[in-house]
Image (cartoon, rainbow, N blue to C red):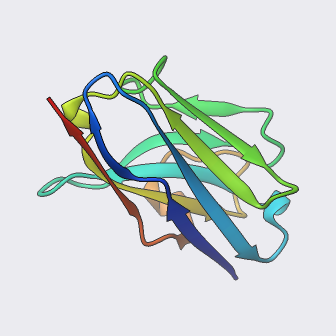
């Protein structure tokens, strides 16, 4: 079992930046690949970024490539999402997720554990 708690969301103007954090507790954090997803009102949850257990591999959705950066600190049991040049269409609840079954994962069904989410709102 692993528990995930996100933080760092908020209201920001278009073009601004936010850094999300996801703190994990429970089993050894470094055994999990991690991911960030987002869900806007009336839409399905969508993949944003993923990172391998060691942090050596990352993958991004095309919509955030070049603007968002996922990273992790296994000593602090934390995964981060640095979001730059934010756009109104980035507005959503952002969730972190963990999987022990895959080296890196891009689909919701591949993840076993989810956080409650943190709201990100980007004003135009």
Q: Is residue 100 above or below residue 34?
A: below
Where residue 71 appears, as percent x and y from the top left, is 68, 39
Q: Residue at x 40, y 23 (%)?
A: 62
The x, y position of residue 22, in whole percent, is: 60, 59
Left or right of 29? Residue 119 is: left
Q: Is residue 7 visible?
A: yes
Residue 73 vs residue 44, the one in the foreground: 73
42 over 62 or under it: above or below: below
* 61 w.r.t. 101: above or below: above
Snapshot quadrant of residue 112: bottom right
Q: Which quarter of the rendered picture does the C terminus lie within?
A: top left
Residue 73 vs residue 9, the one in the foreground: 9
Residue pictured at 40% horizontal, 53% vertical: 9
Q: Is residue 52 visible?
A: no
Residue in the picture at 50% in, 60% down: 7
Residue 30 drawn at (x, y percent): 84, 58
Relative depth, front residue between 101 and 115? 115
In the rendering, at what x and y percent does residue 119 appear? 32, 57
Give the total number of marks visible in the rendering.
0
């Amino acid at each position: 079992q692993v528990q995930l708690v996100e933080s760092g969301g908020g209201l920001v103007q278009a073009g601004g930046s936010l850094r999300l954090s996801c703190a994990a507790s429970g089993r050894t954090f470094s055994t999990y690949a991690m991911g960030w997803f987002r869900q806007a009102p009336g839409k399905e949850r969508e993949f944003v970024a993923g990172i391998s257990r060691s942090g050596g591999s990352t993958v991004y959705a095309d919509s955030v490539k070049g603007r968002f950066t996922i990273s992790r600190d296994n000593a602090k049991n934390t995964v981060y999402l640095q979001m730059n040049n934010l756009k109104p269409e980035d507005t959503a609840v952002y969730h972190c997720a963990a999987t022990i079954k895959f080296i890196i994962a891009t689909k919701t069904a591949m993840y076993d554990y989810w956080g409650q989410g943190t709201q990100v709102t980007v004003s135009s």
